[in-house]
Image: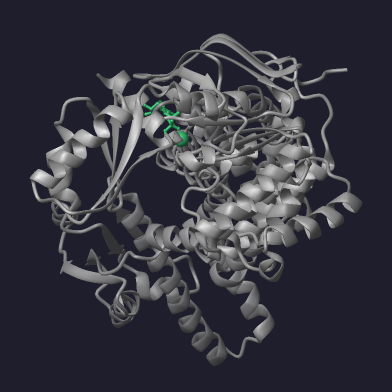
């Protein structure tokens, strides 16, 4: 049997530390707010910063149809504050120049026959060009134009069909065809939010990284180290409260995403919760490794950002596809629990996949957790100075 | 007498300083050992080493027969260590702090209930047991820290300046407790800046720059002071001090409040001389006498000698 240096593990010791740590979190209001609401706050901030803060995007319109219907259509897509018409172009060259100069982020080209095609219930010839150097604005413009176009066509069709005496049932059939045609599911938030969720749920790792340094700085470590508590007992006792806090966030965050951002959870919540618990174990152990090596809270904070959050940002595939990364970066990414958790979160939220697909990632996270715990216990010494 | 703590040429280095420099010390079972020395002498470092909280740089040290370099963890259940700074959990109540340490020291629930009750009473904290430690007065915090240190009834107590910042009455109570524990057979090492406290120990070690420069009973240390002490209570101590400090035969002049203590080579010979000078200079005084040497004089004189 494998035995670490300090022979038996006493549950009473672990429980004593856990209770103490829990009291510390709950009684110090700023700590409580920090650990409970930071993930929520960061999720809201980032979701808005990355998807919604886009406004007044300059576009150009090139109308070959020049009909009343096309005029009405242009009005419809530019109503509100999202898009601003920078110019009415007269040729493709003009649009090209404006795009190149960055004067517009997107252009809408209405082909001849727009009005008549609509009347004939045919596909509508509409072209949108976006500035590929700024895909956020461009995508946003496309999404917006498509949505408005859909509404416009819906309206136009309804009127027309009513006039022709077609019943509501067949209207729905038609509607469906139109939706498929315009691919409305191209919403960036759907893909972004699950990635963000996986990132913000790693935040309690920060608190864990700080907890040893906090005791060192407040002098309480001196009294604690003078007791016969085992190293593993101390580390485990300190991690457990943050796992619980983390799991509270595992409930709050998806609830918020579903009710506020209208993200749908297509897979099983129970599975998500279970795999999140494994993720907590892995990422908090990683925080503990940082805490074991850093003497001050400032240093622990800095290192956490360096090894947990920065790579989390760049390597976990939330913002940059893993496949497009150099080999070393990809290997490094495999060592971060967040990489696997990002895949799991997306998988459960979007296609709604199950354990049959996700098990390798779960195993990887579990393995990383064990490795990090072992590292922390191995390098933590019950000494001052 | 069996020795329970042994160090030999013990050294502890920090990056820039050698905090403990070749300490050789042997402490017998049941001693009440006082550790004194100026700020930065290495008292805290010594106590931390003995509590197994710091690595030994060089030399040997053992507590209860356990080598500190290999078996530091084994001594912990037997030792009660009280840090110089407040190091309990401020956000926990008095009771919760006691329970926390009781659990970590594997005190059985039955013993725990009985002991917390007793320790709270003797620390005078019973009515404050629900108060958070951070909201206690400095003196109460010290008493709570001592109570937490005693919760597992350790064989060895290592107390680092337990009475600093405590009012005189609490200080006396504190020492009554220590004396009682001493009588019950607990081995105690206590560092203190107060010489009257050092006087109550069975043996005193004087540390200076990481070294143990003197180690003896208080009586012997006092007697090592060569010469006598003359105590003067002048009307104007500032003028009087200037006048007498430079007289021949005066080695040291110290003030205690309004009175002056002169360390002289021979009291019998110098007393009439000093009286004569004071009268000549028209410096009035309420009294002048040959006084018994105290720890404080002995201590200051020893330190001055080392600094010279
Ligand atoms: N953790 C540390 N890192 C670096 N230097 C240290 C450390 N602890 C102590 N020292 C240095 O070691 C020397 C001895 O310090 P120590 O605290 O043992 O003295 P002390 O006798 O307890 O002093 P005081 O009466 O002020 O408490 C000092 O010069 C101090 O600056
Ligand atoms: Mg000290």
- In front of the other: A259 or B72: B72
Tell me if residue B188 can be seen.
Answer: yes
Question: Where A319 sits versus B304, above or below?
Answer: below
Give x and y (percent) for residue A268.
Answer: 76, 55
Give x and y (percent) for residue B147.
Answer: 69, 50
Identify the residue at horizontal 62%, vertical 63% (top origin). A26
Q: Quadrant of residue A227?
A: top right
Whether residue A214 sits left or right of residue A22 in the image: it is left
Image quarter in which the C terminus of chain B is found: top left
Give x and y (percent) for residue B120.
Answer: 73, 60
Identify the residue at horizontal 29%, vertical 76% (top origin). A81
Give x and y (percent) for residue A341.
Answer: 63, 42
Tell me if residue A385 can be seen.
Answer: no
Identify the residue at horizontal 69%, vertical 41% (top origin). A281
Image quarter in which the N terminus of chain B is found: top right
Identify the residue at horizontal 46%, vertical 42% (top origin). B194
- In front of the other: A245 or B160: B160
Question: Where A180 sits versus A367, above or below?
Answer: below
Q: Looking at the image, which residue sits at the far right?
A: B110
């Amino acid at each position: 049997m494998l035995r670490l240096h300090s022979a038996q593990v006493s549950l009473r010791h672990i429980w004593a530390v856990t209770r103490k740590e829990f009291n510390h979190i709950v009684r110090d209001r700023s700590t409580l707010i920090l650990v409970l609401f930071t993930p929520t706050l960061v999720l809201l901030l980032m979701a808005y910063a990355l998807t919604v803060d886009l406004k007044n995007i300059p576009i150009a319109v090139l109308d070959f149809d020049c009909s009343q219907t096309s005029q009405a259509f242009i009005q419809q897509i530019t109503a509100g504050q999202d898009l601003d018409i920078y110019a009415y172009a007269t040729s493709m060259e003009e649009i090209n120049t404006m795009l190149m100069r960055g004067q517009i982020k997107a252009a809408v080209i209405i082909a001849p026959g727009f009005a008549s095609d609509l009347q004939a219930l045919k596909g509508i010839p509409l072209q949108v060009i976006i500035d590929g150097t700024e895909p956020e604005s461009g995508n946003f413009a496309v999404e917006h134009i498509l949505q408005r176009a859909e509404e416009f066509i819906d309206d136009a069709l309804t009127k027309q069909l009513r006039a022709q005496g077609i019943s509501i049932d067949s209207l729905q059939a038609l509607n469906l065809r139109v939706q498929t045609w315009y691919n409305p599911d191209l919403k960036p938030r759907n893909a972004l939010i699950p990635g963000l969720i996986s990132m913000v749920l790693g935040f309690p790792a920060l608190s864990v990284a700080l907890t040893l340094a906090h005791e060192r700085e407040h002098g309480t470590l001196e009294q604690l180290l003078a007791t016969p508590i085992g190293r593993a007992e101390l580390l485990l006792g300190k991690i457990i409260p943050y796992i619980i806090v983390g799991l509270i966030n595992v409930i709050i965050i998806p609830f918020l995403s579903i009710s506020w951002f209208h993200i749908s959870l297509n897979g099983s919540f129970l599975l998500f919760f279970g795999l999140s618990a494994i993720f907590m174990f892995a990422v908090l152990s990683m925080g503990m490794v940082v805490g074991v090596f850093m003497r001050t809270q400032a240093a622990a904070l800095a290192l956490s950002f360096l090894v947990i959050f920065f790579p989390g940002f760049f390597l976990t595939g939330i913002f940059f596809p893993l496949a497009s990364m150099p080999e070393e970066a990809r290997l490094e990414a495999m060592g971060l629990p967040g990489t696997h958790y990002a895949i799991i979160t997306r998988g459960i939220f979007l296609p709604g996949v199950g354990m049959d697909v996700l098990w390798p990632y779960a195993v990887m996270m579990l393995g990383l957790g064990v490795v990090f715990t072992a590292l922390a216990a191995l390098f933590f010494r019950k000494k001052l100075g | 007498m069996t020795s329970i703590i042994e160090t030999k040429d013990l050294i502890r280095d920090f990056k820039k300083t050698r905090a403990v420099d070749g300490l050789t010390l042997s402490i017998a079972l049941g001693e009440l050992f006082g550790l004194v020395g100026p700020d930065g002498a290495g008292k805290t470092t010594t106590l931390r080493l003995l509590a197994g909280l710091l690595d030994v740089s060089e030399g040997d040290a053992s507590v209860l027969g356990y080598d500190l370099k290999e078996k530091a963890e084994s001594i912990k259940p037997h030792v009660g260590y009280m840090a110089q700074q407040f190091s309990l959990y401020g956000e926990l109540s008095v009771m919760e702090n006691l329970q926390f340490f009781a659990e970590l020291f594997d005190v059985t629930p039955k013993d725990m209930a009985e002991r917390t009750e007793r320790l709270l009473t003797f620390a005078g904290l019973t009515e404050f047991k629900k108060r958070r430690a951070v909201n206690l007065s400095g003196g109460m915090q010290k008493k709570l820290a001592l109570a937490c240190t005693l919760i597992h009834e350790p064989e060895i107590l290592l107390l680092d300046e337990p009475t600093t910042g405590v009012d005189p009455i609490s200080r006396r109570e504190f020492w009554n407790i220590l004396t009682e524990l001493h009588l019950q057979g607990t081995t105690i090492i206590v560092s203190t800046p107060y010489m009257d406290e050092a006087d109550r120990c069975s043996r005193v070690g004087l540390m200076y720059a990481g070294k143990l420069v003197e180690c003896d009973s208080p009586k012997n240390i006092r007697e090592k002071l060569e010469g006598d002490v003359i105590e003067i209570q002048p009307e104007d101590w500032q003028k009087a001090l200037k006048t007498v400090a430079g007289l021949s035969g005066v080695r040291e002049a110290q003030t205690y409040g309004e009175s002056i203590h002169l360390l002289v080579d021979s009291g019998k010979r110098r007393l009439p001389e000093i009286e004569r000078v004071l009268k000549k200079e028209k410096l009035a005084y309420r009294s002048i006498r040959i006084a018994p040497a105290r720890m404080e004089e002995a201590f200051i004189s020893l330190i001055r000698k080392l600094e010279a």
